[in-house]
Amino acid sequence: MSITDELRAYAGSFYLFRYKDVREKIDAIADSIDAEHESACAAAYGNGVESVVMPDLTKYAKLPVDADGEVIRIGDVMEWIDLDGEVSVTCSVDAVGVGCFFAWDKNNGRYAQKCANAYRHYHEPTVEDVLTEFAVKLIERGELTNGAAQTIAEYAAKLRLADDGKEQ
């Protein structure tokens, strides 16, 4: 197997007589690439390198950032928040691009490009998050006045069994 197999296959598509010179030029370039690659592999092997490893290109490319300014990497779980503040899409990053990332879209059965700054990193909800959401719903419904942060913190500690050890 050669590193130029795909290039040679493409050159093979130029079968018409008038494109013979194009195919010959592509084959010559492929021969040159193969020779250089074999030489580099032989030199690396001679220097004790068992295989040639691609460099980490993330050192050279600026990774996309989410709405909160956090860098997005492959494997991160992202969430999209709609205008009402509801999480409507949670997905796993399979590839990154310039200002975007790619994730599997199960609705369409294919990968979809996502705008990085329209998403944020997903974080498991904490006890405080759940209680805050609960209090916000009560406020929205007029069942509670604003300013419940201290009470939320107090009861979050109780739910985590992280109280000060006093009996209630």
Image: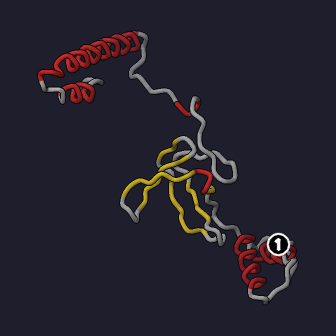
Please name the residue shown 51% across and 51% down the image: 93
Please name the residue shown 67% across and 48% down the image: 70
Residue matched to label 1: 153
Along the viewing direction, whichever of 59 and 88 lies nearer the viewer: 88
**In the image: residue 155, left or right of residue 56:** right
Q: Quadrant of residue 60?
A: top right
Q: Residue furthest left?
A: 17
Please name the residue shown 23% across and 18% down the image: 27
For the N terminus, which image quadrant? top left
* Three-letter residue code for mark 1: Ala
Q: Secondary structure at mark 1?
A: helix
Q: Position of residue 23 (x, y in %)?
A: 20, 20
Q: Please say if 125 is above or below 25.
A: below
For the C terminus, which image quadrant? bottom right
Q: Position of residue 25 (x, y in %)?
A: 25, 15
Q: Quadrant of residue 61?
A: top right
Q: Position of residue 78 (x, y in %)?
A: 57, 57
Q: Quadrant of residue 50?
A: top left
Q: Residue furthest bottom?
A: 143
Along the viewing direction, whichever of 67 and 159 lies nearer the viewer: 67
